[in-house]
Image (cartoon, helix red, strand yellow):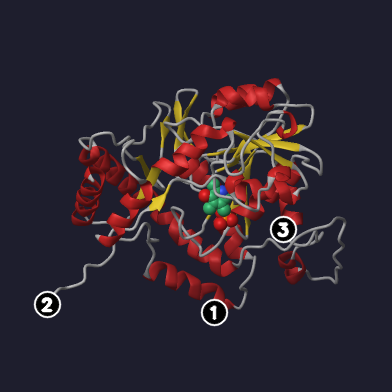
Amino acid sequence: MSEKIQTIPIAKPWMGEAEAEAARRPIMTGWVTQGPEVAAFEQEFATYVGSNHACAVSNCTTALHLALLAVGVKPGDEVITVSHSYIATANSIRYCGATPVFVDIEPQTYNINPMLIEDAITSATKAILVVHQIGMPCDLSAILQIARSHNLPVIEDAACAIGSEILWDGNWEKIGKAHGDIVCFSFHPRKIISTGDGGMLTTNNPEFDQQFRLWRQHGMSIPDTVRHGAKQVIFESYPMLGYNYRMTDIQAAVGREQLKRLPEIVERRRYLAQKYQQLLADIPGLKLPTEPTWAKSNWQSFCVRLPETSDQVQVMQMMLDAGVSTRRGIMCTHREPAYQQEAWSCGVKQNSCDCQPGSCQRLIESEQAQDKAIILPLFHQMTEEEQNRVVEVLQAACRV
Ligand SMILES: *Cc1c(COP(=O)(O)O)cnc(C)c1O
């Protein structure tokens, strides 16, 4: 009798009774969409990251959209970003009618290469949208220096980076303290903490925060909560085009519990990542992720680059057959059918480079990272035994 081994998943949210109980609160009071739980979640979130303001929205993609609108991105503008990211990063730029200008990454950190940014700036550049990919802080101080010298706002896509830290003027500070102008977070289940779906915008600029609050609720001048509590009849007005990008109070109640767990989650992930570093150190040709001295990742994902001789699909299939889920390296947006040549630029003036479909000479590091790296399982509840099994199976797959 052969017992089927359980497949080790790539990720798994850590939630339980506390979250289930919290979700009861808004349901029992009857106030289920954006209300007191959202307001409390925002305050607690701002306190955690150290920002002046935090505004909850429906997800990180809508957060990115509002962030770009707030800094004035309009049709015809260019926004510098990376192709090597989840497709939502670049999509948010296109929602504004603007063109994403893709800059290549550094192979060691999988983050934007700051040395390539200056060359991509044109008179049409309106903003720089950087990503803290899979939780690893990008080189914000170098990026901000370039951005400030060109008077360009910086938006941080921190979808995966809640709990990550950066050394800033000699102190460790949380990503989200708004080192750039606006920071966007995700609470999708693949991220560190989850509300099912959900997003957050942090900033130190009170005008941006006010703007987000109007936009997320149809551009309505008086929020529901204020009308509900009013002793006199009041009518709202709609001074601008808005959206429905609200977070519900049910989600926020869950988020508040998740936030309490966050320090323990980050500590556990750092422990597991360090353990991977030790256990994988001896696999010939395997390249492990590196953390710059000024960065502390939350290890939202643990990404390894396979030996030159290994075939990515073959390794992943062998691991899957042995009961270990993996994912390929982060996607390259410019290789997707939704990104035909006219939808983006690689920084050479309006695509005058001779890129092949699915391959751009200027995005070589991005493409290689997608083709050569794989993401290993890493989640809070992961046992020592499970981690050892991942390592053994990877070791065997690399030997073939
Ligand atoms: C997950 C992710 C997003 C999108 O987040 P949603 O909350 O699902 O909209 C955007 N950018 C990056 C880098 C991500 O990893």
Q: Secondary structure at mark 2?
A: loop
Q: Earlier in the sequence, mark 3 or mark 1?
A: 1
Q: Compare residues 223 and 288 and report the one nearer the observer.
A: 288
Q: Earlier in the sequence, mark 2 or mark 1?
A: 2
Residue 26 drawn at (x, y percent): 56, 73
Label 3 CA crowd tier, 10 Å (few <14, some 14–19, many 20+): many
Give the label on residue 28, or none. Answer: 1
Residue farthest along the left direction in this orientation: 1
Q: In 3D space, how far apart are the residues under numbered discs 2 and 3 (Cα atoms)? A: 57 Å
Identified at 61% across, 58% down, the residue is: 39
The correct choice, above or below, for 226 with respect to 76 in the image is below
Give the label on residue 1, or none. Answer: 2
Report the amino acid beneath label 1.
Met
Mark 2 or mark 3, which is nearer to you? 2
Identified at 72% across, 63% down, the residue is: 244
Report the amino acid beneath label 2.
Met
Q: Is residue 185 visible?
A: no
Q: Is residue 343 visible?
A: yes
Q: Quadrant of residue 382?
A: bottom left
Label 2 CA crowd tier, 10 Å (few <14, some 14–19, many 20+): few
Mark 3 or mark 1, which is nearer to you? 3
Q: Secondary structure at mark 1?
A: helix
- Residue topped by disc 3: 216
Q: Compare residues 81 and 364 and report the one nearer the observer.
A: 364
